[in-house]
Amino acid sequence: MGLEAVIQEILEKGRQESAALVEGAKGERERLLGEARKEMAAVMVQREAEANAAAERRRVQDLARAELEAKRLVLNGQREVLDQVYQEATHALRDLVDGALLGRLLTANAAAWRSGKVFSNARDERSVRAIVGSAYAGTIACAGGVVIEAEGGAKRLDLRYETLLKGVWDDALREVARTLWPA
């Protein structure tokens, strides 16, 4: 075996070892790439789940916000309707000319005005004066009704139509709303 053969044998052995190293490195590379792909897939699944959860939270928040806004709009609309009904009732009372109603108010509270003073609006002055006589003390700005002031001014009985309406309105507001907007 000559030197040339030994060199060829060494070169062949080096090629084989080199090829084996390259094959081993390729295998290691494929293994590492496989692990990286698995890790990347797990991260992608986790990120996708996080993104879906965030999107669901956002959707729920947006839905809740929209429902709240819708309720606010409905309540504002209902409040406007109730305000309009109240204003129309006040105007109807202002236009009410009913001496009998004034008579019933004054008769029911005769004890209070006999020793005191009675006030009314200018429109009802003649009717009130006819009932209370000298207890009539003058006019006040109101839709109708009377204000009775006890002797000395220590006590006032407010029987103005708008005051009576306000008391009835406050007491019956839920029923009015329930009638207008049944649940």
Image (tube, rainbow, N blue to C red):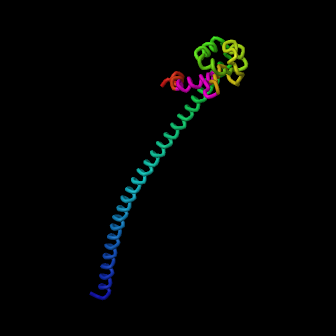
Marker count (numbered): 0
Q: Foreground: 148 or 32?
A: 148
Whether residue 88 is visible to the viewer of this picture, yes or no, is no
Residue 34 is drawn in which quadrant?
Answer: bottom left
Q: Residue furthest bottom?
A: 3
The residue drawn where x is 35% and y is 62% is: 35
Range of the magenta residues? Answer: 153-173
Q: Foreground: 83 or 158?
A: 158
Residue 29 is drawn in which quadrant?
Answer: bottom left
Image coordinates of residue 46 in percent, x first then y, are 39, 54
| In magenta stretch: residue 161 | yes
Image coordinates of residue 108 in percent, x first then y, are 58, 15
The residue drawn where x is 51% and y is 26% is: 174
Q: Foreground: 183 or 128?
A: 128
Q: Foreground: 155 or 7?
A: 155
**Does residue 99 lie above or below 22 as drawn?**
above
Instruction: Identify the image quadrant of the N terminus.
Output: bottom left
Compared across the picture, whether 126 is left or right of 28 comes to right
Compared across the picture, whether 7 is left or right of 118 comes to left
Image coordinates of residue 10 in percent, x first then y, are 31, 82
| In magenta stretch: residue 180 | no
Residue 94 is drawn in which quadrant?
Answer: top right
What's the magenta bit mostly, secondary-structure-wise?
helix
Image coordinates of residue 123 in percent, x first then y, are 72, 17
Whether residue 173 is visible to the viewer of this picture, yes or no, is yes
The residue drawn where x is 59% and y is 22% is: 164
The residue drawn where x is 54% and y is 37% is: 69
